[in-house]
Image (cartoon, rainbow, N blue to C red):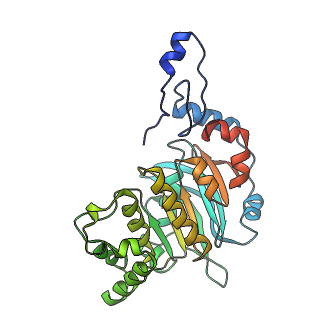
Amino acid sequence: MSDKPTNDSGDDAKADGKAGRAAGYHMGDVDSVISVEEVARQAAEIAEEISVEMLDALAGGDPYLSIEDLCAGYGQMEILHSINLRVGRRQSLCLIGPNGAGKSTILHAIFGFNNIFSGRILVANGAGMSDITTLSPNEKLSRAGIAYILQDKSVFPAMTVEENLWMGGFLKNQPAEAREAAEKVFDKYPRLAARRKHQAKVLSGGERRLLEISRALVMDPDVLLVDEPSIGLEPRFIDMVFEILHDLQHVEGKTIVMVEQNAKKGLEFADLGYVLVSGEVAIAGRGDELLENPKVGELFLGG
């Protein structure tokens, strides 16, 4: 994914001697190239005061997944600085912001893919909140019900669709349990069932993304961490993927935390939206509110 929006008319603007105007990040046309650093600078200027009480209220006053004052990163480099996050059961949250803001790092921290220097990650357990900060990724999946859906190209291309689904149940006690869970996925998605014996490498882009999502469902998680669901897909497949995610949230009751480079599509889908800048939450609100926010629109939604 490019760090800069495309510039189809910059040369013409320069030839005309006119000042360029940036019209968004990853969306819409631009008259001049705006760097990631400039997007971050402008986003920092519109940052709002974000209180924990405000985040709790957005999550309906009863968060299912919480992050408290989290500092995390890679090696000794701290990327996230005292991040707070709240999302309620059966809610969806979309994280947007410029490249390098820490969006995917939040997903990595929740799932245990990076270093956590301080803070806590909590998930509801029926009797309160459980601290899952130090659990391994396997434990996050098997004990806390959290699944990570990676970016594109995470299927095993030489394996069949069926074998890929079985791999999603690698933490099941018995292989038969993984096969039984895979059959439930096939029942739900006939499109995959029709290709169960095909190698994954022959699937279309949309079918591969469906397989990636379905593989995560084999363990029947409660929380889905979804990293860039639309990346690399044609528009018709993007719509299909978001319809699947809508079904998982509203029919199956999954809680979804998503990073999406198509900010408009992500905020249209999600109940909640956070704008991240330089490892901090700059703006938080309901998805529809952020769509109507002119400052967010100018930087991230195409003006």
Q: Position of residue 4 (x, y in %)?
A: 48, 34
* 166 on left or right of 27: left
* 302 on left or right of 174: right
How many dots with numbers? 0
Which one is in front, 65 or 205? 205
Locate the C terminus by quadrant.
top right
Vertical arrangement, residue 294 with respect to residue 52, above or below: above
Vertical arrangement, residue 19 with respect to residue 22, above or below: above
Q: Examine the image and state in which quarter residue 152 appears.
A: bottom left
Work out whether residue 96 can be spotted. Answer: no
Q: Residue furthest left?
A: 158
Residue visible at 61% across and 33% down? 41
Q: Position of residue 186 (x, y in %)?
A: 39, 79
Residue visible at 62% across and 41% down? 301
Q: Position of residue 246 (x, y in %)?
A: 58, 66
* 215 on left or right of 272: left
Work out whether residue 53 can be spotted. Answer: yes
Which one is in front, 95 or 70? 95
Which one is in front, 134 or 227? 227
Q: Position of residue 85 (x, y in %)?
A: 64, 60
